[in-house]
Image (spheres, rainbow, N blue to C red):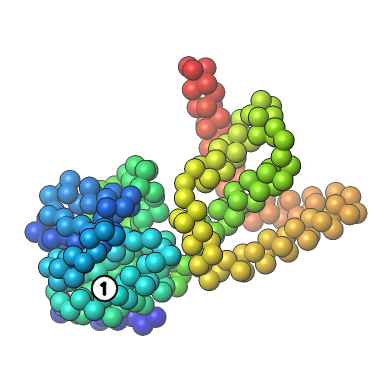
Amino acid sequence: MGKGRHGNGGQFKMKISPSRSIGIIGGRGRTGSQFARIFRRRGFKVMTTGSKDSDNNKKLMRGCDIVIFSVPLMHSTRIIEREIVYAVRKNQLLLDVSSLKYRQCRALKKAAGEVIGMHPLFGPTTEHLGQTIVLCPVQCNKETLRSLQDFFASLGIRPIVMTAEKHDHLMAVLQVLPHLKSLLVADVLHKIGGDIIDTINETATPAYRIELNLVGRFLDDDPTLYGPIILDNPETAHILALLRRSLSEITEMLKGNDLRAFAKKYHLLANFFGPQTKEGREKTEICIRTMSRLKRRT
């Protein structure tokens, strides 16, 4: 994807301030309404549209200074391509909050104004303070990007800038891999069947309960959210190939009851993780102690 005007000193500079009007396409959904609240609390005038009043998207696109697409990932590119014909203002900033960025940013690039892809790495039910948001500049002035970074930083949200391609590659590790892990654990437990969940809850260590709770958290949502994150990422096939390779290596260890090969792999991975191993133990111990205190209170 080309650099557009990012870094090329475009003439228009968008200052993110309450004097700017905000329009959110998909602003009635969970993520859209979350961003509507964020901006309204900061004094912005916010207009939203939903699936039932999408006829107002044209008015929103032409009238608002900043437009955010907050639509389901599976439909995001199609909706952006449909509505982008109304993005004729050069003094306008377009954003989207999709979990994937390359195709969405490519569609947004057809706008006359400035474009920055955006991915909040926190859910609509999660407190945003202390969380991270990824910004993918497509065509924008450096000052516009800096203003958007400063705005999120003022909210306690850490902005990270990268290309759309790098974002999607990174999400294969940050989203696809852990989601696949939760899906696979749940599927294996389902295949074991019986009262396995009840048995686990009765006998599991606190550390394993953390693992099980992460699986439960994953399943306590919507497949139309997680499905496209996994299935639409161009790196998912590669991640699955690596998983098959790892399972094949472990299968060979099992066939030969090869503890030496297992220990060699274990130490190799521990060295690769480095200080993260100690940090992981310390932080999970904090979680375990917290869970124990909460259990005693109940």
Task: Answer yes or no: is residue 2 visible.
Answer: yes
Residue 144 appears at what percent x and percent y? 21, 68
Q: Residue furthest front?
A: 52
Task: Answer yes or no: is residue 35 visible.
Answer: no
91 lies left or right of 272: left
Q: Amino acid at mark 1?
A: Glu
Residue 262 sits above or below residue 113 on the image: above
What is the crowding at mark 1: few (fewer than 14 residues within 10 Å), some, or many (at least 20)? some
Which of the 4 quarters of the picture holds residue 105? bottom left
Quadrant into which the N terminus falls: bottom left
Q: Where is mark 1, residue-wise?
A: 83
Residue, x 89% and y 50% (percent of image)? 257
171 lies left or right of 131: right
Residue, x 45% and y 55% (percent of image)? 225
Residue 275 appears at what percent x and percent y? 58, 48
Residue 288 sits above or below residue 172 on the image: above
SS at mark 1?
helix
Residue, x 31% and y 72% (percent of image)? 80
Residue 159 appears at what percent x and percent y? 33, 57
122 lies left or right of 32: right
